[in-house]
Image (cartoon, grey):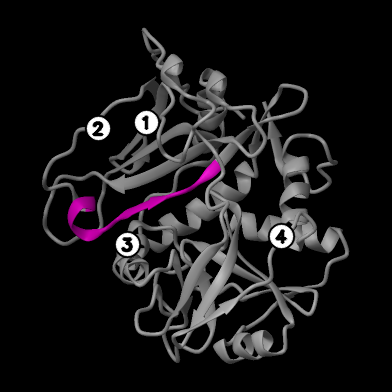
Amino acid sequence: MELTQPISVQRVQQSRLQEVDFSNLGFGTYVADHMLVCDYKQGEWQAPAIMPFGNLTLSPTSLALHYGQTVFEGMKAFRMQDGRINLFRVHKHHERLSRSLDRMAMAIVPEDVFVEGLRQLISLDKDWIPTAPGTALYIRPFAYASEAKFGVKVSDEYKFVIFSGPVAAAFQKPLRVRVETQYVRAARGGTGAAKCGGNYGGAFYPTTKAKEAGYDQVLWTDAKENKYIEESGMMNAVFVIDGTVVTPPLSDSILDGVTRDSLLTVARDLGIPVEERLVSIEELEKAFRQHTITEAFGAGTAAIVAPIGTICIHDIDYQLPAYDAQAIMFRLRDQLEAIRTGQAADKHHWNYVL
């Protein structure tokens, strides 16, 4: 993909790679050597640049700090079985970033800047990609309103940045979650389908209250009736009921998860029934009483699948059956991993191989 403006590259003088404990990566602990930066001003995107990872400078009057024009993406690069590098579903992530930017009235990052910028950045930091099963190079593209003017307005200037870091899989121990009926993550007509910072900041307080009560996360319900399940913490919510993979349908209050879409596609490929439909609290209670719910999990970039072991509904803890390797969620995860690493056919053309 050719850029209208070439990417300038300034390499680090000394790599920090030797500081990484690849046997104990955690999540968000390490950041790779370089980052990509691209500015938007005077109505157009400027030439992108790759430079050593470092602090950004901004004015205290930068509009993002006051009015919340900031969005991000979360994606991963994988080391394939033959040693090549795979940027998974790069175009799908650009599409979602564009929708988020549009919803927040921000300038849309050109696809060539996004894709070619990722290609060059990850190629430069390829040695940071871990090789152990379940690990990956997490990639964080984000943009924010950088104009220094504190009056309430849509910014005329933006900064787009991409950085990355090696990670292990998150949320492997079955989670304890509580159905949240007092606080809401997003309302119809709001920004729930955009990956913007405010959605996450607003979720911290009820999540903290749930943790104080002994739970790891919340299951969000709809803002109108607090009757239907929408998301699982920072992830899409998925259940297995009567052998069918069931997940709430996408709407403007639910994020269009790339992992969600991938797992549902893999399930259909494997002949596992899939239903995208409303899931009520009442249905979950009934399914627990009748023992028809066998799995619950969150689906997201960080964890791929995050098993749920306990769901608290109206102050009653319902337990999911113990999971083994044959659980549907793990079969889906393993098949997705096989596609990403080149061990299974990529028939949907998801892989962007460097």
Pointer 3 local density, CA inside 10 Å: few below 14, some 14–19, many at least 20: some
Write down the quadrant of residue 35 in the picture.
top left
Name which of mark 4 and mark 1 comes first in the sequence. Answer: 1
Residue 152 in view here: yes
| Residue 147 higher or lower than 270, as above or below | above
Say which amino acid is labelled 2.
Leu
Q: Which residues are magenta?
A: 64-75
Marking on residue 37:
1
Which quadrant does the N terminus fall into?
top right
C-beta proximity under 8 Å, tags 4 and 1: no
- Marks 1 and 3 sit apart, C-alpha to C-alpha, by 22 Å
Q: Which mark is residue 198?
A: 3
Check residue 56 in the rendering and tell me which mark sits there, or answer none.
Answer: 2
Which numbered circle lies on residue 329? 4
Q: Is residue 129 magenta?
A: no
* First along the sequence among labels 2 and 3: 2
Does label 1 or label 2 sit earlier along the sequence? 1
Q: Are marks 3 and 4 in contact (CB under 8 Å)?
A: no
**Residues tagged 2 and 3 counted as in contact (Cβ below 8 A):** no
Mark 4 is on which residue type? Met
Q: Position of residue 116 (x, y in %)?
A: 55, 30
What's the residue type where badge 1 is placed?
Val
Above or below residue 80? Residue 290 is below
What is the CA distance from the residue labelled 4 to the residue labelled 1?
37 Å
Closer to viewer: mark 4 or mark 1: 4
Give the distance between the C-alpha atoms of the residues marked 2 and 4, in whole angstroms.
40 Å
**Residue at 84 percent of width and 46 percent of height:** 347
